[in-house]
Image (cartoon, coloured by chain):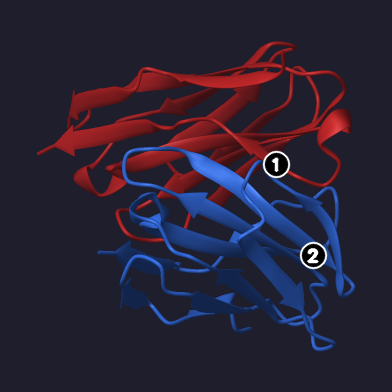
Chain colours: A blue, B red
Amino acid sequence: EAGVTQSPTHLIKTRGQQVTLRCSPISGHTSVYWYQQALGLGLQFLLWYDEGEERNRGNFPPRFSGRQFPNYSSELNVNALELEDSALYLCASSSGQRYGYTFGSGTRLTVV
Amino acid sequence: EDQVTQSPEALRLQEGESSSLNCSYTVSGLRGLFWYRQDPGKGPEFLFTLYSAGEEKEKERLKATLTKKESFLHITAPKPEDSATYLCAVQADNYGQNFVFGPGTRLSVLP
């Protein structure tokens, strides 16, 4: 069974640019979660999508957005990149409330 | 205020030296407590789920326990390959389906 896949693995962008990160959940999982992990910090919840709808978002500005497609894959978009957006962006999927997440390997974003 | 804390922040052990990591939480309506292992630059890897006080789970050299206010991850006779950051996460009534992660404990096991 394929795990959660994320692309790209690494990305370097300039301040002010826009970026799109992609995630494919485990087959059969309808929920996708996005987390930001800045260097030395814990995982901060960004967004939760389920069945194509945004269900919840964390305490991040509106320039962080995303969507979920009918095949349950998801995109995370970040506009007007700032230096502090440099982080590992993790996507996870889940099959239900009582199960833990399965994480992808993440996308390392560096903003210069 | 709901909180998930972990201690110690970092732990250095000699190979074979057993120890415990702590995850303390103050939430309303705990649904589950999850332990993950994270290697540098990688996504967290699921280890255990605990649902009620008194529950215990074991996997190789790791054993997780849960009380009403905290969870322990016991590491028995660790090996260098156990070096990683260990994260706990809490799922509670007021978080919906979201998990709140603790800051993690960075474990180093020296040969």
Quadrant location of residue B77? Answer: top left
Q: Which residue is mark 2?
A: A49
Secondary structure beneath dot 1 equals loop
From the viewer's perspective, is residue A50 above or below residue B52?
Answer: below
Distance (Cα) linking label 1 and label 2: 14 Å
Tag of residue B77: none
Q: What kind of residue is marked 1? A: Phe
Instruction: Tell whether label 2 touches label 1 (CB within 8 Å).
Output: no
In the image, B86 versus A44, the foreground residue is A44
* Left or right: where B26 falls relative to A106: right
Pinpoint residue A43: horizontal percent, then vertical percent: 51, 44
Quadrant location of residue B8? Answer: top left
Disc 2 crowd, CA 10 A, few/some/many (<14, 14-19, 20+): many
From the viewer's perspective, is residue A81 above or below residue B62?
Answer: below
Pinpoint residue A10: horizontal percent, then vertical percent: 33, 75
Q: Chain of mark 1?
A: B
In the image, A107 versus B32, the foreground residue is A107
Q: Which residue is mark 1?
A: B99
Q: What kind of residue is marked 2? A: Tyr
Q: Quadrant of the N terminus of chain B?
A: top right
* Left or right: where B86 falls relative to A3: left
Work out which residue is located at the far bottom of the displayed protein and give it. Answer: A71
Pinpoint residue B33: horizontal percent, then vertical percent: 69, 33
Q: How many marks?
A: 2
* Left or right: where A52 falls relative to A92: right
Quadrant location of residue B40? Answer: bottom left
* Residue at 39%, 47% in the rendered image: A38
* Residue at 85%, 50% in the rendered image: A97
* Residue at 22%, 29% in the rendered image: B16
Labels 1, 2: front one = 2
